[in-house]
Image (tube, helix red, strand yellow):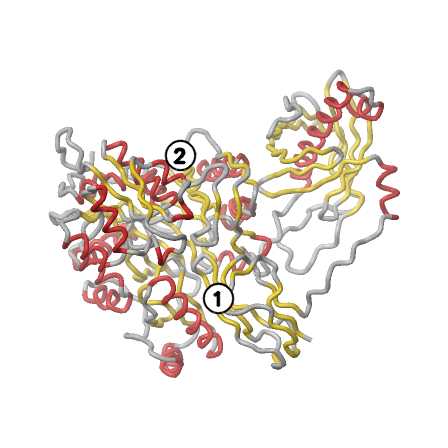
């Protein structure tokens, strides 16, 4: 409905997607919808990937490393020639904002589904783009105009601007090559790390510096422009929930904008697009301070990761629009036709360990079941059995929900997160669930420092309260009773029979240290439970996940539990009634991952819980079991993740101070500086630069 018709003929006969994973799959879906044949390119590591199998044709373009495959322009050009593709969609990342790649396509008569090379070139350099924005009357952040060539020039610039500052790669994006500094020392380290990341990710280590806007919101405007001078903006996206400048959860529209501000931001975004003769989909990113002043951050001359939420509230298929604009069609939609239809939320589901500073996780997805339902969308490039490797971004999927309003959209997101089943590697579902439940998120009081402020010591699990303990225990006990009932039907087991049908008291021992006593009673065929806390670990300072209960506290009495759960079901849906039948009802979902009675592994609100359900006498005797003393790692430097040793900065016999950088490990295009855990002398260096290492592998030992 947005573009002029072109009969029944598809805009192109064949499109090659120069990307991988979920974004390649996303483009293939639009190609199929338009009747266009699709071509996938893949590395040797992606030979069996979902995107490789989804396309009509697939061409291998090299080894696993991106530099030898997805970033090889020559091999992609050869794939285009071999398959006869008429056009190329770049997705995001990789070559999507590489002007040289676009020039090669233009030179060979291949259509690039995106902007022209001169627009990419103009906006790709953040120093140059800031100058253009100034000339186009777009609000910009105060900063040092030009490249920062060394640390001396950096310190001169930072002291002129005043701390805090943002050190940024000029060719950067996706949070790479960016560091915030509050002192000279932090600025120097940030400069070194940003330069190295920029060189590795973009092949350009140019760095600039600007004032860091405190208490900012990250709000961006989605544009659609054609080659005939027409352009519209598709409202805004709120992308303030970030970690290390990587977006984690986005929503559209924003709770903070007004219709007037939206119009002003949209107008400035279109002014910038006009200044570079922009055509295709693009995004202008702004920082907005607490007074609703907004400043140009950068323009992404590509499809954004978070585009689905805009599609849901604008009812516009952005990928389809890109394809038709690239074919020369003219936009027929005007700004007055753009509305805001409900609310949408996107959670980025990553293979990472939020309990260990969000370190990337690799491995096979041994279990993978996506949530389904009305207004739930999952954009992914994986399936059960897929491998998340160290070579690429650890994203598993983009989970998107849509509702009539913000409350409805977030309710759908909670439901979807609770239904997601992922096993085989670590993931961030529990953290995403915690974000959705956070009071400040619910009220819309967010900034780009939300995660740093509310999880300063990292993520330690979801906060619990008595109601949530009731729900979790109800699911565990229902699974346990089901296991006992199944066991009693197979053998004359007196204990199993008593648990299945009679009143019984059991002890729930969680590996977190929480110990609960649960008494089950049966009345008129209904099951009731009463739960009391016996042992609760003392909270730690800064703990973001309080247990919400105290030793001796009665959590519930005579709580009616109803469920149709049967032994072997993957999910236990329970209904809880306070006050018996007809009482206050609460529904909960507990995923049953492993049932090896008396031990259970379950997931509740995205978080895994290990619990043993034992007889009270067994619990009494457990205090006599020997305790395993863990190995002392206080003098060891361990690799926090699987990756490649970028550098080793010390040698044996060298004195080091606590916090001193001793090595750098690179994984998934991000560099991680490893620091000395204490003062001491380097006893042993166990690795060399260039070596691959595993998570928790000892790299350096001190004495």
**Disc marking residue 690:** 1
**Local SS, label 2:** loop
Residue 427 in percent (x, y) is at 54, 47
Note whether 619 is above or below 298 in the view shown. Answer: above
In the picture as drawn, the residue positioned furthest to the top comes out as: 524
Q: Quadrant of residue 518?
A: top right
> What is the secondary structure assignment of the residue under circle 1?
loop
**Quarter of the figure with residue 284:** bottom left
Q: Where in the figure is residue 303, as x and y percent of width and height?
A: 30, 48
Q: Is residue 262 above or below residue 404?
A: below
**Residue 571, image x and y in percent?**
60, 30
| Left or right, residue 408 beside residue 486 | left
Q: Please say whether residue 610 is visible from this viewpoint.
A: yes
Eyeballing the image, is 166 above or below 404?
Answer: below
Q: Where does label 2 land, which residue? A: 404
Q: Examine the rendered structure and indicate whether residue 351 appears above or below residue 190.
A: above
Tell me which residue sits at (47%, 41%) in the image: 386
Binning the other alpha carbons within 10 Å of mark 1 as few (below 14), some (14 to 19) or many (20 upward) gives: some
Residues 273 and 205: in front is 205
In the visual, does 689 lie left or right of 143? right
Q: Nearer the viewer, residue 254 or 83?
A: 83
Residue 508 vs residue 202: left or right?
right
Q: Position of residue 440 (x, y in %)?
A: 51, 51
Residues at marks 1 and 2, CA–CA distance in whole angstroms: 52 Å
Which quadrant of the rendered structure holds the N terminus? top left
Residue positioned 76% across, 34% down in the render: 598
């Amino acid at each position: 409905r947005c573009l002029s018709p072109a009969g029944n003929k598809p805009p192109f006969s064949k499109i090659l997607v120069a990307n991988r994973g979920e974004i390649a799959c996303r483009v293939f879906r639009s190609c199929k919808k338009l009747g266009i044949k699709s071509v996938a390119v893949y590395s040797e590591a992606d030979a069996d990937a979902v995107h490789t199998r989804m396309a009509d044709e697939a061409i291998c373009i090299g080894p696993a490393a991106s530099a030898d495959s997805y970033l090889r322009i020559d091999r992609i050009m050869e794939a285009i020639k071999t398959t006869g593709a008429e056009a190329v969609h770049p997705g995001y990342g990789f070559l999507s904002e590489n002007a040289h790649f676009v020039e090669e396509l233009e030179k060979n008569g291949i259509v690039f589904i995106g902007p022209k090379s001169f627009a990419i070139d103009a906006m790709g350099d953040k120093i140059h783009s800031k100058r253009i924005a100034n000339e186009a009357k777009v609000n910009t952040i105060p900063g040092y105009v030009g490249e920062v060539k060394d640390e001396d020039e950096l310190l001169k610039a930072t002291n002129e601007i005043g701390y805090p500052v943002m050190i940024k790669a000029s060719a950067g994006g996706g949070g790479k090559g960016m560091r915030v500094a509050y002192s000279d020392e932090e600025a120097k380290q940030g400069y070194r790390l940003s330069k190295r990341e920029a060189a590795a990710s973009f092949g350009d280590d140019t760095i600039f510096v600007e004032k860091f806007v405190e208490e900012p919101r990250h709000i961006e405007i989605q544009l659609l422009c054609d080659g005939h001078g027409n352009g519209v903006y598709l409202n805004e996206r709120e992308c303030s929930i970030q970690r290390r400048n990587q977006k984690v959860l986005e929503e559209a529209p924003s709770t903070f904008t007004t219709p007037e501000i939206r119009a002003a931001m949209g107008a400035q975004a279109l002014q910038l697009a006009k200044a570079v003769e922009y055509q295709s989909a693009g995004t202008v990113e702004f920082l907005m301070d607490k007074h609703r002043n907004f400043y140009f951050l950068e323009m992404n001359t590509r499809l954004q990761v978070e585009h689905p939420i805009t599609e849901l509230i604008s009812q516009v298929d952005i990928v389809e629009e890109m394809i038709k604009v690239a074919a020369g069609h003219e936009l027929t939609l005007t700004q007055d036709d753009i509305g805001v239809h409900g609310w949408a939320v996107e959670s980025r589901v990553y293979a990472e360990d939020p309990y260990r500073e969000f370190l990337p996780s690799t491995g096979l997805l041994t279990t993978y079941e996506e949530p389904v339902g009305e207004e739930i969308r999952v954009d992914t490039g994986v399936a059960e059995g897929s491998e998340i490797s160290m070579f690429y971004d650890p994203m598993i999927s983009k989970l998107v929900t849509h509702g009539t309003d913000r409350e409805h959209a977030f309710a759908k997101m909670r439901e979807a997160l609770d239904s997601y089943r992922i096993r085989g590697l670590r993931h961030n579902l529990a953290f995403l669930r915690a974000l959705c439940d956070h009071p400040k998120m619910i009220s819309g009081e967010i900034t780009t420092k939300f995660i740093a402020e509310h999880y300063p010591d990292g993520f330690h699990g979801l906060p619990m309260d008595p109601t949530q303990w009731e729900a979790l225990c109800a699911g565990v006990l229902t699974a346990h009773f089901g296991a006992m009932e199944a066991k009693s039907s197979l053998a004359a087991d007196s204990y199993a029979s008593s648990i299945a049908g009679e009143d019984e008291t059991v002890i729930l021992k969680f590996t977190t240290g929480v110990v609960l006593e649960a008494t089950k009673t049966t009345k008129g065929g209904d099951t009731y439970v009463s739960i009391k806390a016996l042992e609760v670990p003392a909270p730690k300072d800064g703990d973001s996940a309080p247990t919400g209960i105290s030793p001796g506290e009665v959590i519930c009495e005579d709580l009616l539990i109803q469920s149709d759960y049967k032994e072997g079901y993957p999910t236990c849906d329970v209904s809880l009634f306070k006050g018996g039948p007809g009482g206050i009802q609460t529904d909960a979902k507990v995923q049953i991952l492993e049932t090896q009675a008396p031990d259970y592994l379950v997931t509740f609100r995205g978080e895994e819980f290990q619990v043993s359900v034992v007889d009270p006498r067994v619990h009494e005797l457990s205090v006599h079991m020997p305790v395993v003393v863990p190995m002392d790692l206080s003098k060891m430097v361990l690799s926090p993740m699987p990756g490649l040793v970028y550098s080793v900065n010390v040698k044996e016999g060298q004195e080091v101070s606590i916090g001193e950088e001793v090595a750098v490990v690179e994984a998934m295009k991000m560099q991680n500086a490893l620091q000395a855990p204490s003062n001491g002398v380097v006893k042993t260096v166990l690795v060399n630069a260039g070596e691959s290492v595993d998570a928790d592998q000892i790299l350096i030992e001190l004495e």
